[in-house]
Image (tube, rainbow, N blue to C red):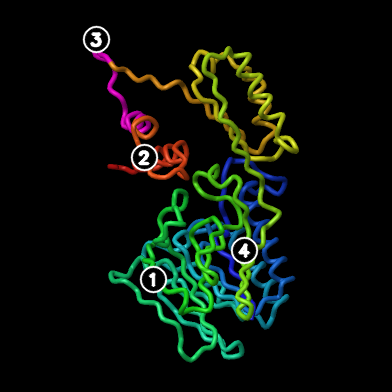
């Protein structure tokens, strides 16, 4: 038996306010295109079972266009594979906060052969496959006050666990995907299951010979620079051979995180030249790509004197161009004169993380963690009364 495992498609995701010829947000169209490619590839593989491990949509109330396109893609999948059941569970992004609020995923149960678990844990049995699938959507874990003990069906030869959760495992670092319900490592045992299909973590991660996060199909995390070089796709598992295969998608838009350039002691013209050199080295130019260039130790006076006409041209050529200029950090060891302005909380946090915080692992990226911490702080400060 062959199982295809896909997750975190995030249909309806939008960014950058760019619109294509059809009037659709360009990034929303990117996400939809990646899902269509996945459906094409899955149809060609012709597996015996398809599981979608949560976050089909990016928001609880997706646009009508996203809802309709998802319906068309599932219907197309079923036409191509009429004997292959599809199992869909809800993730944190497509789960309403109130249990009384309807879940849009229920709509897809109207398609024959599509099975949905959106609120409580649900076990599905497929006698023609001699298989059982235990579905654990986000809400089943988030609403549980006690640890869940997940057990396979003793009557089935093949048992599949599908869960959308933040797994307690040192190989999984949730820097970008937050809001997921925790699944303790001791609550599930890979050796008890034929296959464990996990969603929520956007990077393909093999946790056991028969357990994996399949990753996302496009780059949709808040700090997408962290996954610029991470391939996107889905997983296929062969129960007879115990073989786990990652299938990379070709359609996701390229994201380039360039630099950092050190502007310390450079004149504006020299910074312009360094910027031009790093962009000239990009394979295939920057047209249509999502690009960030980090420039460190750049005084405000130097930044103001840069060739901003050229920077505007770069922003027009790329889908999104972010020149991330950071001034030199000033660390005062003595105080003199009149009292100055008190540092903001964001400034204090940034100073601590960049100069005083000791990293506990060489794999940690100080700049990425600092950017994520500042983003969380901004989100909290934006909450009324926060």
Which circle's residue, 2 or 1, is located before the other in the chain? 1
What residue appears at the point 54 percent right and 63 percent down from the top-left corner? 206
Look at 62% across and 36% down and name the residue there.
291
- Mark whose residue sits in front, 3 or 4: 4
SS class, disc 3: loop
How dense is the environment of label 2, judged by Cα within 10 Å: few (below 14), some, or many (20 and up)?
some
Whether residue 163 is visible: yes
Q: Which residues are magenta?
A: 334-351
Counting the numbered discs, the total is 4
Query: Pointer 4: what residue?
Result: 234
Q: Which residue is mark 2?
A: 377
Camera-nearest label, 4 or 2: 4
Circle 3: is it few (<14), some (14-19), or many (20+) Cα within 10 Å? few
Disc 1 target residue = 140
Q: Secondary structure at mark 1?
A: helix
In terms of secondary structure, where does tag 4 sit? strand
Query: Does the magenta stretch mainly form a helix, a strand or a loop?
Result: loop
Q: Which residue is mark 3?
A: 338
Q: Earlier in the sequence, mark 3 or mark 4?
A: 4
Q: Is residue 386 left or right of residue 153?
A: left
Q: Is residue 115 above or below residue 157?
A: above
Residue 268 horizontal/vertical position (percent): 59, 14
Q: Label 4, label 2: how many angstroms apart (C-alpha)?
A: 33 Å
Question: Where's residue 380, x and y in %?
Answer: 34, 43
Given contact means CB atoms under 8 Å apart, are the residues at marks 4 and 2 in contact?
Answer: no
Q: Is residue 305 magenta?
A: no
């Amino acid at each position: 038996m062959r199982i295809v495992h896909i997750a975190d498609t995030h249909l309806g995701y939008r960014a950058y306010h760019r619109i294509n010829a059809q009037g659709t947000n360009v990034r929303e169209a990117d996400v939809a295109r990646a899902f269509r490619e996945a459906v094409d590839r899955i149809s060609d593989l012709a597996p015996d079972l398809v599981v979608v491990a949560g976050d089909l949509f990016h928001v609880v109330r997706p646009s009508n266009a996203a809802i309709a396109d998802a319906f068309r893609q599932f219907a197309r999948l079923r036409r191509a594979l009429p004997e292959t059941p599809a199992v869909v569970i809800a993730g944190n992004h497509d789960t309403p906060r109130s249990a009384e609020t309807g879940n849009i995923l229920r709509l897809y149960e109207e398609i024959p052969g599509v099975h949905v678990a959106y609120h409580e844990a649900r076990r599905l049995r497929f006698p023609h496959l001699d298989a059982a699938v235990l579905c654990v959507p986000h809400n089943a874990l988030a609403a549980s006050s006690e640890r869940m003990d997940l057990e396979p069906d003793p009557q089935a030869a093949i048992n599949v666990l599908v869960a959308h959760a933040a797994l307690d495992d040192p190989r999984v670092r949730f820097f970008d995907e937050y809001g997921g319900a925790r699944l303790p490592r001791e609550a599930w045992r890979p050796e008890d299951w034929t296959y464990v299909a996990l969603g929520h973590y956007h990077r393909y991660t093999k946790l056991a010979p028969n357990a994996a996060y399949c990753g996302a199909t496009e780059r949709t995390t808040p700090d997408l620079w962290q996954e610029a070089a991470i391939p996107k796709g889905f997983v296929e598992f062969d129960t007879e051979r115990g073989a786990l295969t990652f299938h990379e998608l070709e359609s996701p838009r390229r994201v380039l995180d360039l630099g950092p350039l050190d502007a310390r002691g450079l004149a504006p013209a020299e910074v312009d030249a360094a910027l031009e050199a790093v962009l000239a080295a990009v394979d295939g130019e920057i047209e249509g790509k999502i690009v960030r260039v980090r420039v460190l130790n750049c005084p405000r006076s130097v930044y103001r004197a840069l060739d901003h006409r050229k920077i505007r041209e770069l922003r027009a050529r790329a889908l999104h161009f972010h020149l991330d200029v950071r001034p030199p950090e000033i660390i005062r060891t003595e105080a003199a004169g009149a009292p100055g302005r008190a540092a903001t909380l964001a400034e204090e946090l940034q100073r601590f993380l960049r100069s005083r915080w000791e990293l506990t692992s060489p794999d940690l990226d100080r700049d990425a963690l600092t950017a994520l911490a500042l983003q969380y702080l901004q989100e909290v400060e934006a909450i009324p009364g926060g």
